[in-house]
Amino acid sequence: MASQEEQQATSDSWGTLDRRFRGPLRSFFVRRTKSLADAEDLTQEVFVRLIRNPDRHGGTSIEAYVFTIASSVLRDWKRSQLVRHGHAHVALLDASDAPNISETPPALVEEKTPERVLIAKDALRGLEESLNQMSVRTRDIFLLSRVEHIPHREIANSFGISISAVEKHIIKAVEYLAARAFKS
Amino acid sequence: MNTPETLSPNDQARLHAAAEWWERLRSEPALELSAEFQRWVSDAAHERAFQAVQDTQAALQHFSASHRILDMRQQALKSLKEGRTYRHPYRRVGLIAAGFLVMAVAGGGFLYQNVFSGQTFRTESGERRVVALSDGSRISLDSDTELNANYSGKDREITLRKGRARFDVAHDVTRPFTVTAGDETVVAVGTSFNVERLGPKVVVTLIQGRVSVRRRMQDSFLSADHGRISAVTLSAGEQIAAQEGTAPVVKAANLDAATAWEAGHLVFRGEPLGDAVAQVNRYTENPIVVDQSAATIPVSGVFNAGDVTSFVSAITSYFPVEATTGTDHEIRLQKKPT
């Protein structure tokens, strides 16, 4: 049984945790689920898990600990979405050039309707166009890092450039891809 | 159609900041909950820029195996390799010569058949490759891997000769997709799985879908009716390890660990040192040798594939293992004397 002092300490840090992380967690989940309602539920789930394991973060910072819980809550949610929409999901994949099955973002796991298929095709075409608009070197370096997961050092060696130059190419490519989706 | 250049200077700056944040968060994900990031992203225009980055990066992963993007990936890998070749012209010639030698020595019978029917794909140590087959199936080859794909109107047969590969199989009920590795054959129905040859052992991990794993008959007089062929059906998240002369073992797999190699990581959780080193050796031309005394010591940890030095230093600091380096720079791991 925790003493009164300890309980006081816990509820204090609880209030602090809530103030500090509720907002950030909500936007973390909104960005990934695109649904306010889901984001609220998932944020709540993070706090539930935090209450159950209040001080399991050992040596790591509280930020890293909360983030780890949030990531695992998100992973469970994605899995449940996959189960729920499993068949529709496969159908959508069939319609869109056999994309990578394991890394499907949740936003694309949806019912297969003609509109959805069109949206998927549009997204793919946009992506291809953006990749074609950047310089070949930028694209090569970006794909090697982001899709093939080749270490920056190895890319730098092979292309005869510095690691920071590799990073600049990657950021440039990220900007090219995002520019299409960014409306001010 | 927007490119960064067509945006207003202010939007260009926002987008640039968003891309930089995206990169920082990749190496330090927990920063997403930091006060600093929250302050930046609380501005609505920043939030939109960040969302644009996040959505397009997710879309890229989603579509990374579509045909045109696959072509671009091949081209990128080619550029990488050409850069390397330029630096090491002799090494490459040597490897090609070795390849011919293997083909010449193995020239007869069964292997000959396999080499010249269907397509052979191989990777050198330190190289990874993704190939798309005519039916839309996709194979991701780990370093130092070789396989043959033989498609006919009736079936799709893959033979994994060595190494490790991940298969994302296009659904086609009329043509079964099989992968044979040693004596084990995996039959897949529209599914995603990993097959790995570790010396005499074959490890199959099912990521999604359903497969059955069969052992080839050792003695052609025995039929399935005699119960000598074991067929095991795996469910998603299960792994089977099979080795000649022992009963195959099915266990729950850690999918993050089993698929980490695609991201360039090696994850070990209590694996025998011998098996772990076999995986590490796939990425280096100077293989580590494990002494019998240390081969069964269980080791754990996450390592960058290709970083042999860190692997050796971690293993020797956390486990009862010591390393000696021979005159030819060969690294040898053995049990620490007690």
Image: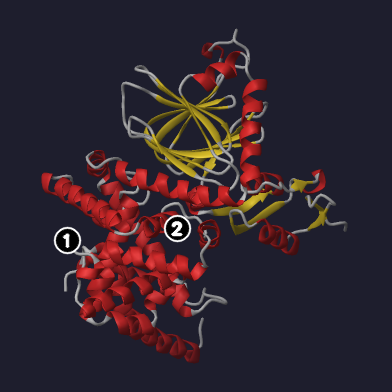
Residues A55 and B275: in front is B275
For marks 2 and 1, give the CA distance.
26 Å
x, y percent for residue A129: 24, 53
The amino acid at mark 2 is Ser
Q: Quadrant of residue A19?
A: bottom left
Q: Quadrant of residue A146?
A: bottom left
x, y percent for residue A172: 35, 67
> Which residue is farthest right?
B338
Give the position of the C terminus of chain B as an image quadrant.
bottom right
Q: Is B99 situated above or below A176?
A: above
x, y percent for residue B241: 58, 36
Describe residue B72's horizontal placement relative to residue B215 as left or right: left
Q: Residue at x 26, y 48 (%)?
A: A84
SS at mark 2? helix
The 10 Å Cα crowd at callout 1, few under 14, some 14 to 19, many 20 or more, is few
Q: Which mark is residue A145?
A: 2
> Which residue is farthest top?
B221
SS at mark 1? loop
Give a yes or no on whether discs 2 and 1 share a subunit: no
Q: Residue at x 23, y 79 (%)?
A: B9
Q: Is B54 situated above or below B40?
A: above
Tell me if residue B282 can be seen.
no
Describe residue B321's horizontal placement relative to residue B62 as left or right: right
x, y percent for residue A138: 38, 60
Q: Which mark is residue B209?
A: none
The 10 Å Cα crowd at callout 2, few under 14, some 14 to 19, many 20 or more, is many
Q: Is A94 situated above or below B77?
A: above
Q: Is B93 situated above or below B110?
A: below
> Which residue is farthest left?
A115
Residues A184 and B289: in front is A184
For mark 1, what is the residue?
B1
